[in-house]
Amino acid sequence: MMSSVVELKKLTKSYGDVTAVNEVSFTLEPDKIYGLLGRNGAGKTTIMHMITAQLFATSGELKVFGEAPYENSRVLSQVCFIKESQKYPDNYTVKDVLELSSSLFPNWDRQFANELVVDFQLPLKRKMKKLSRGMHSSVGIIVGLASRAPLTIFDEPYLGLDAVARALFYDRLIDDYADNPRTIVLSTHLIDEVSRLLEHIIVIDGGKVLINEDAEELRGSAYTVAGTATAVESFIAGKTVISREPFGSLLTAGVTGRLSEQERKKADSLGLAIAAISLQQLIVQLTSRKKDVKGGARG
Amino acid sequence: MNRVNNVLKMHQRDKFAWMIIPSMILGSSFLVNLIVGFLSGVEIYTGGLMSIFIYMFVLGIIVLPQTFPFAISFSIRRTDYFLGTTLHAVTNGFLMAIGLLLLSAIEKATNFWGTGLHFFHLPYLTDGNIVQQFIFNFLTFVLLFFWGFIIGSVFRKFRAVGLFVLTLACLLATTVLTVVIISYDWWDNIANWIVDLTAFELSLWFLPVILCYAVISFVLIRRSTV
């Protein structure tokens, strides 16, 4: 049995003197849903392109299903990578894309694909270049789901999709995942929308791994404290504070770390409200901190 | 083989680029010539047949931007992409070469469409026997396809800068060659040699060029990214 689906060791990609991905190391285990999160230009797409052998790493080691992915049909036939800006041949219809996918992906489920076409209300005979932005994205989503590839990667797959269609995608994904477990990587900015799906989270920032942690662990690793400024200040003294949002005489602070029973009582006695921090807030705080520091230094 | 077959399927699905457009181009060129021939009543020798050969060149250029990013993103290996695309283009060239022979035979049999229009059955091209005529058609198609294909590959690997450098290099090479030919007074010999070549002999000279183009595009495609 294979220990890991993807293994990155000090993977680096540089363009001239710009380093897009800087010594990134992580592993993806089989049958888990991963969130690959980070800001625009953090290097997520570059990493995913390297995993699928569409881009070449400058240095470092990369193994997918235990082997190097470049020109490796054993690896590539098990991978399905759906990206936001996917190009299709100009004359291709929706049907052409789906029919071809059924020959390209060994686990393709034709019936599932047909159901999804109905769900997403796609016109099969329409040419890809005549589809609206949302429909274009739906085709990618259908291919990604119906391919049932042991490693399925979605990179911002839903540009132009409305909330209903996105919810449909999450529902179908989670339903099908329950019956056909596989490794799924979701890369997205809509962190709160997908946070219930994610089992493990990798945050990339500035070409480096910032966080690589179990989703549950991460959710419990920070909280917010709200109350009068003085009470909050006394409570957070000595703690790692990641955010501060004053509002009049009130203050809301984000704090990392776990809350002990003693601390909880202390907060109660001070009249402070403790709340769980959302994954999105947490990641926004963590990935924007650097910018704040820079801004401060400049000012 | 199954994987190369998938690439064939990918191209076969694009009937528009490989069948409908070339038929339309050749058909409309033929139709215009036929009408002119019919109205004028003069015997016409036309180069309208060129259009289909030129289209093959254009197809060679556009096939990469049209299908390569798609194929690579859909888990197709670069090697399989190259082999499948080559196989598809060669098969197409083969069928089109036979098609042109048939049309040429029909043209002759109908006494040049009854109007004296020489569109498919042209002097020089039809000098050799039927096999030689076929080989000329076939190799010309393949040459033009790979000529386009190598341009597409250079663009894929090195982008606009690469294409620009390549164009400059070609211009420079042609200039140097011309200067050498003039200074050594080789013009007469070269002209005589070309004039003496039959269409069939000429097409055999395409072979090494096709091979060069194919090998270089293969190497470039193997290193191309999306």
Image (cartoon, coloured by chain):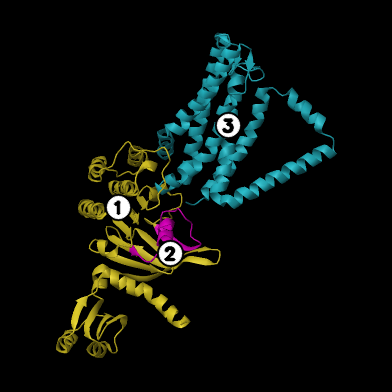
Chain colours: A yellow, B cyan
**Residue A62 placed where, x, y %?**
43, 60
Quarter-wise, where is residue A289 in the image? Answer: bottom left
Q: Point out the image quarter for the N terminus of chain B.
A: top left
For label 3, the residue is B54
**Residue A12 placed where, x, y %?**
47, 65
Q: For the residue marked with disc 3, what is the amino acid?
A: Ile
Crowd around label 3: few <14 · some 14–19 · many ≥20 (10 Å): some
Crowd around label 2: few <14 · some 14–19 · many ≥20 (10 Å): some
Q: Secondary structure at mark 1?
A: loop
**Residue A40 placed where, x, y %?**
40, 64
For label 1, the residue is A161
**Residue A74 placed where, x, y %?**
39, 48
Q: Secondary structure at mark 2?
A: loop
Q: Residue at x 64, y 31 (%)?
A: B206
How far is disc 3 from disc 1 in space, using C-alphas? 42 Å
Q: Chain of mark 1?
A: A
Q: For the residue marked with disc 2, what is the amino acid?
A: Gly
Who is closer to the viewer here, A241 or B87? A241
Q: Residue at x 42, y 34 (%)?
A: B14
Who is closer to the viewer here, B163 or B76? B163
Q: Which mark is residue A41?
A: 2
CB contact under 8 Å: marks 2 and 1: no
The magenta stretch is A36-63
Crowd around label 1: few <14 · some 14–19 · many ≥20 (10 Å): some
Q: Is A126 located above or below residue A229 in the figure?
A: above
As drawn, is B149 to the left or to the right of A278?
A: right
Q: Secondary structure at mark 3?
A: helix
Q: Chain of mark 2?
A: A
As drawn, is B55 to the left or to the right of A98?
A: right
How far is disc 3 from disc 2 in space, using C-alphas? 42 Å
Q: Chain of mark 3?
A: B
Q: For the residue marked with disc 1, what is the amino acid?
A: Leu
